[in-house]
Amino acid sequence: MNEKIIGIMGAMHEEINSILHLMAGIEEISYGRRTYYTGTINNIKTVVVFSRWGKVAAATTVTSLITKFNITDLIFIGVAGAINTELKIGDVVIGDRLVQHDMDARPLMPRHEIPLLGVTYFESDPNYITIAKKAIDAIVGDHVHSFIDEYEIERFLLRKTRVFTGTIASGDQFFAKQADKELLHAVLPDTLCVEMEGAAVAQVCYEYEIPFVVLRIISDECNENSSIDFPDFIQNVSSKYAYEIIKNMFALL
């Protein structure tokens, strides 16, 4: 049996930097204009890398993790915009299904179906979903006080944060208008949140038969206020979420 090597991709530099604090024996390897960090977390071999933004960049990164660094499992963590109105800033979504909302090869095949694969939704590994749920349950709600400053809790209204499991949509588009949000909801009504990498990463993992899970921290509500305080949220909230979630998940592996 192959030795377990877990790849961790983060959507922002700040999230990656926080995760590096969990690693021992770090070595940096430059490859394909990316910096990969190898080492261990909780004595498990791990490779951590910034995904870069967009589907092509993220797919390239995970392909290198699989073919050059020989990962056996993949965890993707980052921020996303809420599509479902139940979601609030600070909630966390576990993507049990990933779909590319901008894939449209009609009339050759149904909208959102991936050409040549006959697949529309890519499913995360059930075991990793269970582990992620336990790890995230330990940091949401009242637990947020243990690692987020009170100022940030008040600023982003993080007092009743929750974890959700459901569909994540990905595409090469930043959602910053209410109209775009409503249009996506109309065509993919089960979507909880939207981002720019997860479903592309999921497709590569599917093709290489790599167990994976995609986790997204809600940073905005996909409307005209999407950019407000975004850098502050990344620095002081989502990067800390990433640290706590990965720490808890590796304790359960």
Image: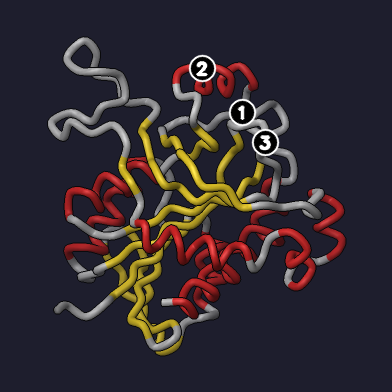
Residue visible at 29% across and 48% down in the picture: 59
* In-image side of 4 versus 186 (left or right): left
Residue visible at 79% across and 49% down in the picture: 156
Q: Point out the tag, 3 or 1, that comes first from the N-terminus.
A: 3
For the residue marked with disc 1, what is the amino acid?
Ala
Q: Secondary structure at mark 3?
A: loop
As drawn, the label of residue 86 is 3
As drawn, the label of residue 176 is 1
For the residue marked with disc 3, what is the amino acid?
Glu
Q: Point out the tag, 1 or 2, that comes first from the N-terminus.
A: 1
Image position of 31 with respect to 221: above or below: below
Residue 56 in sight here: no
Q: Which residue is mark 2?
A: 186
Q: Residues within 10 Å of mark 1 (few under 14, many from 20)?
A: some
Q: What is the spatial separation of the Cα atoms under label 3 and label 1, in whole angstroms?
A: 18 Å
Residue 155 place in picture, x, y as percent:
84, 51
To which quarter of the image does residue 32 belong? Answer: bottom left
Residue 195 place in picture, x, y as percent:
49, 40
For the residue marked with disc 2, what is the amino acid?
Ala
Residue visible at 18% across and 28% down in the picture: 115
